[in-house]
Amino acid sequence: MSYSEITRTLESKGVKVSRVTVMRWCKGLHDPFNRMNSVRLEPSPELAYIVGVMFGDGSTSFRKSGRSHKYRVRLKVVDREFAEEFKRCLEVIGLKPSLRFERNRG
């Protein structure tokens, strides 16, 4: 396919990319995945832990703001060590989570 054909094919899938960008990808001058986090989803104890926690106490949300996409994973628990272990497992698979704690008097 020509660079223009690749561009049109991507546009038909809802992805707008310039012909020059496609040309740079094909020549190896730029990486199309350079802004994406690489996440390791191979079976591991950490991934199993994450899946189990998400089925139990976790939730996810998605927000699109302009060109950026934000995914949020939330965990609502009482035990601080549980939250810290969840964060550690997320880091092992390649994510960069932040940990915040709420003060709840109830």
Image (cartoon, helix red, strand yellow):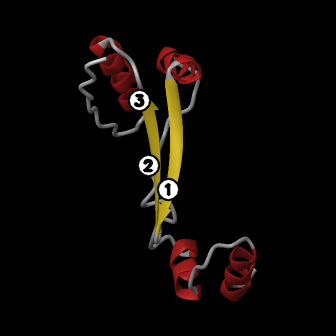
The structure residue drawn at horizontal position 50% and vertical position 26%, both measured from the top left corner, is 58
| Place of residue 43 in the rendered image (x, y in percent of width and height, measured from the top left) | 58, 22
Residue 80, relative to residue 2: is it above or below?
A: above
The structure residue drawn at horizontal position 40% and vertical position 38%, both measured from the top left corner, is 95
Can residue 28 be seen in the rendering of this structure? yes
Res 25 → quadrant:
bottom right
* Quadrant, the C terminus: top left
Give neighbour class at mark 2: few <14, some 14-19, many 20+ (Cα, 10 Å).
few
Q: Earlier in the sequence, mark 1 or mark 3?
A: 1
For label 2, the residue is: 37
Question: Mark 2 or mark 1, which is nearer to you?
Answer: 1
**Side of 8 relative to 62 (left or right):** right
Which label belongs to residue 90? 3
Q: Are marks 1 and 3 in contact (CB under 8 Å)?
A: no
The structure residue drawn at horizontal position 56% and vertical position 22%, both measured from the top left corner, is 51
Q: Earlier in the sequence, mark 2 or mark 3?
A: 2
The structure residue drawn at horizontal position 59% and vertical position 86%, both measured from the top left corner, is 19
Q: Are marks 2 and 3 in contact (CB under 8 Å)?
A: no
